[in-house]
Image (cartoon, helix red, strand yellow):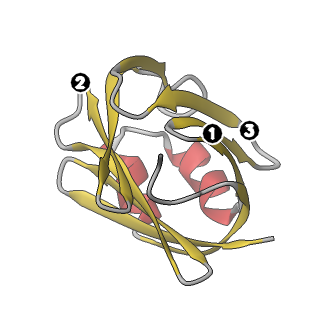
Amino acid sequence: MAPVDFSGTWGLVSSENFENYMKSLDIDFMTRKVAKMLTPQKVIEQQGDKFSIRTLSTFRNYLVEFKVGEEYEEDTKGLDNRKLLSLVTWDNERLVCVQKGEKKNRGWTHWIQGDELHLELTCEDQLCKQVYQKV
């Protein structure tokens, strides 16, 4: 049984250092300008250790599906268009993803604190912190 239930629809309320995180992924200037203005929603469906996370915005949508503890191929088409080997594991009540590919130190961590969903994105030496609330 999973330690936390992440299921729900979450709306972005704050984002720190997103621009530099996108630069570390070599995302072009125009895309970064548009992406910075968005307030995406995350729709998370969780059944035990199986997850579907949809990130929805007016600009583009992204879907990732995985089972905790099983490495999978991730195609970041529409984001930075790379192929990665990703592995999500539980670290106490946090979901931690390590993404192996062209970029070093790439991945993310999700956790719930109170009524907020926290997301930290890392790539190389950049850390982006985002906070979402249930909508």
| Left or right of 80, for residue 10 | right
Q: CA distance from mark 1 to mark 2?
A: 31 Å
CB atoms of marks 3 and 2 within 8 Å:
no
Disc 3 target residue = 60
User: Separation of disc 1 and disc 3 at Cα?
Assistant: 25 Å
Q: Amino acid at mark 1?
A: Gln
State which tag comes first along the sequence, 3 or 2. 3
Residues packed near mark 2 inside 10 Å, few (<14), some (14 to 19) or many (20 plus): few
* Vertical placement of residue 29 versus 71, above or below: below
Residue shown at 62% from the left, 53% from the top: 35
Q: Which badge, 1 or 3, comes first in the chain's sequence?
A: 1
| 103 lies above or below 111 | above
Q: Nearer the viewer, mark 1 or mark 3?
A: 1
Residue depicted at 63% across the width and 43% down the height = 46
Amino acid under disc 2: Glu
Residue at which label 1 appears: 47
- In the image, taking residue 104 as reference, residue 48 lies left or right, namely right
